[in-house]
Image: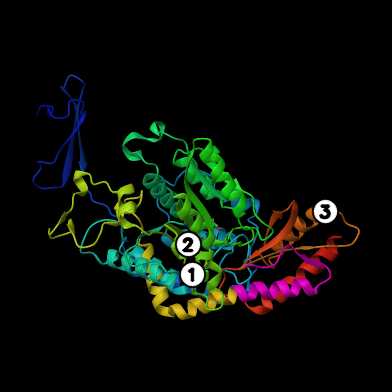
């Protein structure tokens, strides 16, 4: 036995010539290629599948029953439970070398993990802007996991048809043309990054992919309102524009981008030799759910030859609420539209989406086919081409089967009900605003534009600094007492409780309860 020539540094050679297949022989070479040692071990085989399927099946049934019980009885539990120190301490230490019984591992989950999560499935979770999941969505995630489904490439597989149909549904529901392209993503941060990549590569006027941003003939600028989400800045930084190229335009009293300032900023940049390439419109900001004047932004983009990107993380779905869809009019004119299905649409995290009006622009920004992924028209098998490979429309190759939970849940309930639910959340925001207006102890920050209500507890004689601290304490007490989760935001220099409603489980009475409890806690704290 001599050392194989192909791998000059190979130090271990596995010899399996033993025809009985009962043992394996490791032959260890030194650097000169001389045999140093031979070791023989039993030829065993292992797998991560259960040794005993029957008991694993029983555990599986138990887990599913527990999960359904949990969802059925959500209302009876605190919204959120502070994870105590011993829970944090439980998650320290090295990885386990030896196996533990599957049932014990599950019990640890039940004891230490389950009770101390974020709480966003609960009917009174309204912090920030978060969705709350669906039962069918949970089943779909289990099914997708059961086949360890990979989405993104390959042909003649059903996953792709499901994702393409979900994308077609999104286009139809949001007023986009069927010729547009799209991709399901892990969330709106990824969607914004993809949308702005297409914007940059299409509008830069040179070969960004080949030559890189360091060879840009002109500095490019991008515009959004002061209230735009941090993921826009992250995308701008990741794409090599630099945060200095992001022009944050002041907002009007309705928290919408001020159009006069926007036009002036574009004019000023042009006069200084810069290249304005993109305006980002907000369809529902995170702090106040403000919706920019999207038709006006589309007009300005047309005049200024800028790409029109809309961040509609939550608010895009206003388009299916019968009474409120006019609020996002103009959104359908965007060159790219980023949104989530895990906020409104209520699907399990993670699932977001990006749509791009011009599919060629989209594909040009991402398409890349190494030999190991070569695929060809007319070929049969997994590497043929029956539909576009979605890996050509984003930066990820392998993605989970996010589409399945959307497809199954939307089919289960129908889009009409979804429209009513989104309308219900907006109606609930208006209802809460009326309750706040009717309570002398409370003050509304600004009129409700969509599904977010910002208000604060007030008390004559307390200045803004005291009220800021007091409302922050009320937020904490609401959370710690398990009553509700609201967050706080600072608007025009004052702290307000922030109730963002993207929750199909909330009822009218939950908002009555919230108002009563805020007033009670406020009075106790003063
Ligand atoms: C939540 C949010 C995002 C980011 O979305 P993720 O799904 O959390 O990545 C972007 N924009 C707005 C307006 C948002 O509210």
Residue tagged 3 = 464
Q: Do the residues labelled 2 and 1 touch (CB within 8 Å)?
A: yes
Q: Give the range drawn in magenta.
A: 426-449
Q: Residue at x 37, y 35 (%)?
A: 212
Q: Earlier in the sequence, mark 1 or mark 3?
A: 1
Instruction: State the image coordinates of residue 523 (x, y, percent, origin top left).
Output: 85, 65
Question: In the picture shown, does residue 202 fall above or below 383?
Answer: above
**Where does residue 455 sit, x and y in percent of width and height?**
74, 64
Quadrant position of residue 161:
bottom left
Judging by the rendered image, the residue that carries numbered circle 2 is 340
Q: Quadrant of the C terminus?
A: bottom right
Q: Which residue is drawn at 42% across and 75% down?
A: 410
**226 vs 287, nearest the viewer:** 226
Image: 423 above or below 48: below
Could you tell me if residue 387 is visible in this image? yes
* Label disc, if present, on residue 345 of the rendered structure: 1
* Badge 2 residue CB within 8 Å of ligand 1: yes
**Which residue of the protein is positioned furthest toward the top in this rendering?**
32
The crowd level at tag 1 (other Cα within 10 Å; few <14, some 14-19, many 20+) is many
Residue at the far right: name it. Answer: 461
Q: Quadrant of residue 51?
A: bottom left
């Amino acid at each position: 036995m001599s050392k194989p020539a192909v791998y000059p540094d190979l130090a271990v050679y596995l010899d399996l010539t033993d025809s009985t297949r009962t043992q394996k022989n490791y032959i260890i070479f030194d650097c000169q290629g001389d045999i140093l040692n031979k070791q023989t071990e039993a030829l065993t085989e292992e797998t991560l599948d259960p040794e005993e399927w029957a008991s694993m099946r029983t555990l599986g049934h138990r887990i599913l029953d527990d999960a359904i019980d949990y969802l059925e009885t959500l209302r009876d539990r605190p919204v959120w439970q502070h994870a105590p120190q011993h829970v944090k301490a439980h998650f320290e230490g090295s990885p386990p070398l030896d196996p533990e019984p599957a049932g014990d591992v599950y019990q640890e989950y039940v004891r230490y993990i389950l009770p101390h999560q974020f709480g966003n499935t609960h009917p009174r979770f309204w912090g920030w802007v978060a969705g709350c999941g669906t039962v069918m969505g949970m089943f779909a995630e289990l099914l997708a996991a059961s086949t360890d489904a990979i989405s993104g490439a390959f042909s003649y597989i059903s996953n792709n048809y499901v994702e393409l149909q979900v994308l077609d549904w999104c286009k139809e529901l949001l007023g986009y043309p069927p010729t547009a392209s799209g991709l399901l993503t892990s969330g709106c941060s990824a969607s914004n990054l993809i949308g702005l990549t297409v914007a940059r590569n299409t509008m830069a006027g040179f070969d960004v992919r080949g030559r890189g941003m360091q060879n840009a003939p002109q500095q490019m600028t991008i515009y959004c309102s002061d209230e735009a989400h941090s993921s826009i800045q992250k995308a701008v930084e990741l794409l090599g524009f630099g945060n200095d190229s992001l022009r944050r335009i002041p907002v009007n009293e309705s928290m919408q981008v001020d159009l006069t300032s926007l036009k002036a900023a574009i004019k000023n940049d042009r006069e200084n030799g810069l290249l304005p390439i993109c305006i980002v419109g907000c369809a529902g900001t995170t702090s106040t759910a403000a919706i920019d004047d999207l038709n006006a932004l589309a007009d300005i983009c047309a005049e200024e030859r800028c790409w029109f990107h809309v961040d509609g993380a939550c608010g895009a779905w206003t388009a299916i609420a019968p009474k409120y869809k006019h609020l996002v009019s103009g959104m359908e004119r965007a060159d790219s539209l980023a949104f989530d299905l895990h906020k409104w649409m209520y699907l399990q995290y993670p699932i977001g989406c990006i749509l791009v009006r011009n599919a060629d622009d989209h594909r040009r920004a991402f398409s890349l086919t190494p030999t190991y992924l070569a695929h060809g028209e007319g070929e049969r098998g997994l590497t043929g081409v029956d539909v576009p490979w979605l890996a050509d429309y984003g930066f990820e190759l392998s993605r989970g089967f996010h589409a399945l939970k959307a497809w199954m849940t939307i089919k289960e309930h129908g889009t009409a009900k979804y429209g009513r639910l989104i309308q219900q959340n907006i109606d609930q925001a208006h209802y809460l605003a009326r309750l706040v207006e009717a309570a002398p102890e409370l003050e509304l920050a600004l009129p409700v534009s969509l599904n977010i209500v910002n208000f604060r507890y007030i008390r004559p004689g307390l200045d803004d600094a005291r009220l800021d601290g007091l409302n922050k304490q009320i937020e904490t007490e609401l959370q710690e007492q398990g009553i509700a989760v609201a967050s706080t935001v600072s608007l025009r220099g004052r702290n307000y409780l922030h109730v963002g409603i993207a929750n199909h489980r909330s009822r009218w009475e939950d908002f009555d309860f919230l108002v009563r409890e805020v007033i009670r806690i406020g009075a106790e704290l003063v």
